[in-house]
Structure formats: structure tokens, C-alpha cells
Image (cartoon, rainbow, N blue to C red):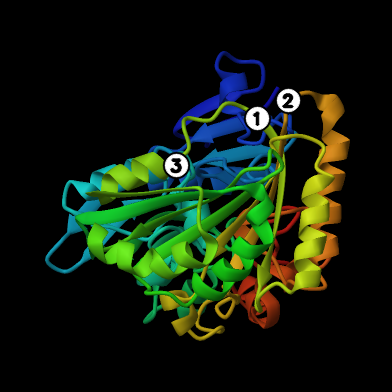
Amino acid sequence: MVRTEGLTGRVILQGEGGYDEARFNYNGRFNKFPKVIVYCEVVQDVVNAILWARKQQIPFRVRGGGHSYEAFSNVDGGLVIDVSGLLRLEINRDVGTAQVGAGFRLMDLYEALWKQRVTIPGGTCRSVGISGLTLGGGYGLLSRLMGMTCDNVLGLEIVTAKGKIIYANEGQHSNLFWACRGGGDGSFGVITSFTFRVHPIKNVARYRMTWDFSDLEKVVRYWQAWAPHVDARLTSLLSLTAKGRLRSNGVFVGSEQELKQIMRPLQEATRPKTCEFHSTTWIEVARRFAALPVKQEKFKNSSAYAYEPLSDEALGVLIRNLQAAPGPTNVVAFDAYGGSISEVPTDETPFVHRKALFVIQYLSYWSEDAEADKNIRWIEKFRESMLLYTHGAYRDYCDSNIPDWPIAYFGENFARLKKVKRMYDPENLFRFEQSIPK
């Protein structure tokens, strides 16, 4: 029997009603069974949970949206500290800031900010938590114009390993502030709120193009030389599927007429099969790009960065891997970087991949457990075979099979992250499979 004296908030024990829903993993590949889940409703609930875990000497994880690709926010036999109930929001449009509770999911935050016609540069997945997204860097449709999500953090409230509530920004606890802007979640403390810089936004334009799969080499060659260098108001994505689909989507903070002019070189060079442009609002684009409410799919994803255009040899490797995909739902996605992302020095935040042209994400989905091994092997082989031409990995696309993950995620910034860890969590209380070590 677990003794829960000292825990506050909504506490759910293993075996109680609602437990299976409470232990939910975004990635259905994992099936973890924590002993206790506490839904924190106020910051003091977080403090009490940490103090309780210390006293009980029980392992714990911190969960915002529960979106970890590798279920790092869940733990067998331990405590899950869930902050999804921390939903305070205060927007100061005149100053251009917002105080955002750590429990917000991305689409809910977009909707709330839109009421004031402001936003932050976040991602595209509806249900991802703002905490995990931001702490790992945070990239999305506005990042080339406005920077990574972490670049827009002005301060944060955090509960430390000793249960102390502190506020970190450039002027106080500046090392911790640095570490929490791209150094990953779950290593230094529990973030309970963020102060974000917000940006005015109203109307935008979007495009969608498709090509015959036989045009893949031509399209990738041109896209990779164009998308990272084009007007920073435009973010372009390219998707290659094992089904033989080849398409690009993008968002432009400006008029449809301007977008058509900017897109003309890509159109003329690649001759898409279909092409459409639309004038719309930012929130409609966010809703369109946001994934539908997720079911518990099983998947394995990984990533790498292209710092140089992929050579003909690299494209050959890419095509052969796609042809060897174990199922039709296997995908390779390219997201263009450049713009404001590349203007920030690589050591200004832990997010080190500022000079990359684009990030590559390898994705594989399946429904039956018997299909898991071949899909996981496909992802591992794909990423490994492309490492001759790519570098590193994105922390928010965490992959437990990357052997050199500290360098892949953080590069030369890893050493400073370890120093901050020793300063704020010398006992290594906040730990999981890919947490920052002492």
C-alpha cells in the first residue's frame, strides 16, 4: 500500500478508477505502470510532490502533454508529476508578453493567444505540451521569422530538487535560464510557468504542392537549395512517403500575391502536378496543420540535420531506404531552417543546430505489435545510413537508440549543461534515460 500523506492535488493510485486513462502514453508502443499519478492544480502541489518523492525515495517523472516519443514522462513503479492543470494565462499585448502556465497544450494556447491577435512560434501538433516543446527547443511554422520557441522565453518559474520555487531569467539564476531554453525537459526542475515574448499576427497565406514521386530527386535538389534561404516570412515543409507521395506545404506571413511571387522559382524549376494558394488567418492555418486528436498509435521516430545540401549519393541512399520501407505509413519529412533560427549564436541557448539548412525526421507507424521490430529497425538503419551526409538530432524528436545522444542533441553545449546540472540538482534527483547527467 502506497502512503500518499503529503501529496496534494488530484492523486490517482495504481488500480483505482481512471488509472488507465491517467497513465496514457502518446506513443502507444509503450505500456508503463506508475504507482502514483498526481495532477498538480497549483504550484504548491508540485513542491509537495517533489518533497514526497524525496522522502519516499521513489523515482518520478514530470509530465506536461505526455508527448515524449520515448515515453520519458512516464515511469514504471514510480510517481508521475502531471502539470497539465497549471493553466494560468496573462497576456500583456502592450508590452508584448504572456505569462503561460506550464500545463497548456499547444493548440489551446494558440486559441487563447489568438483572442488578442498574438502568438508564439510553436509547433504544429495539437496536443503537445508547451513545456516539453519549449524546453527541447521548439520549432514550427513561424520559427524562420520569429525564432525557436525557446528563443522567445523571457523567464520561467521552476521548482527545484529541494522543493524551492525560484524565477529564472537573464538577471537571476541566469545559468538555469540558459539551460532551460533548449536543454531538454526533466533534468533541472519542474517548470510551472513561462514568460514568453508574443508577436502580433493576423492574416497569412499558405500553399500546397504535389509532384509525381518520380520527380523526387529533382524536387529535393531544388527545395534544399531554396527553402532555407528564401524570405524568412515563409516556412516550407517537404514530405516524402513510402506510399509514393511527394508534397510540400508552407505558410507565409504576408499576402497571397507576395507568396505566389516567392514560390514562382520553385514552381518553374520543378513543375508540380498540383499547386494551390490560399489567403487565410494564422489561427486557421494552425488548426489546419495541427494533427487531429490522437489515438494511441505505435510509432518510432528519429531525426538528423542537414548542414549541407544532400548530394546525389545521399539522395540515392534516401530513395533506397524509402523503397525498403516495411509499410505505407513510413515517412521522411524535411523542415526548412535558416532565417531567424540561424541568426542566434550556437551557444546562446543549448539548442546548437542553428546553422542547419533543414531538419530531417524519419517516421514509422504501425498497429500490430508483430510489426514493431521491422519498423524500428527500418528507422535505425535509415538514420545510420544517412549519417555520412547529416549530423546530430533534435531533442524534441528524442530517440533512445542514438548512442551519442548528448552530442547529437547539444554538441559543444553539453558540457555547460552538466555544470548547470551540478549547480541545481547535484543529487541527480531529476533523472531518466536521456536526462542531463551530473
Q: Residue under label 2, please give it.
A: 367
Q: Which residue is drawn at 62% across and 20% down?
A: 20
Mark found first going from the N terminus, 1 or 2: 1
Badge 3: residue crowd in 10 Å (few <14, some 14–19, many ≥20): many
Q: Mark 3 or mark 1, which is nearer the start of the sequence?
A: 3
Q: Which of 232 and 58 is in front in this view?
A: 232
The three-letter amino acid code for the residue at tag 2 is Ser
Q: Is residue 322 above or below residue 179?
A: above
Query: CA–CA distance between discs 1 and 3?
Result: 31 Å
Disc 3 marks a residue whose amino acid type is: Asp
Residue located farthest toward the left when viewing the structure as drawn: 94
Instruction: State the quadrant of the C terminus.
Output: bottom right
Residue 411 position, x and y percent, is 69, 78
Q: In this view, does 139 lie above or below 372?
A: below
Of the two numbered discs 2 and 3 in the rendering, the one whose residue sits closer to the viewer: 2
At label 1, which amino acid type do we have? Glu
Tell me the SS state at disc 3: helix
Q: What element carries label 2?
A: loop
Spatial distance from mark 2 to mark 3, Cα to Cα?
A: 37 Å
Identify the residue position indicated by label 3 in the image. Answer: 45
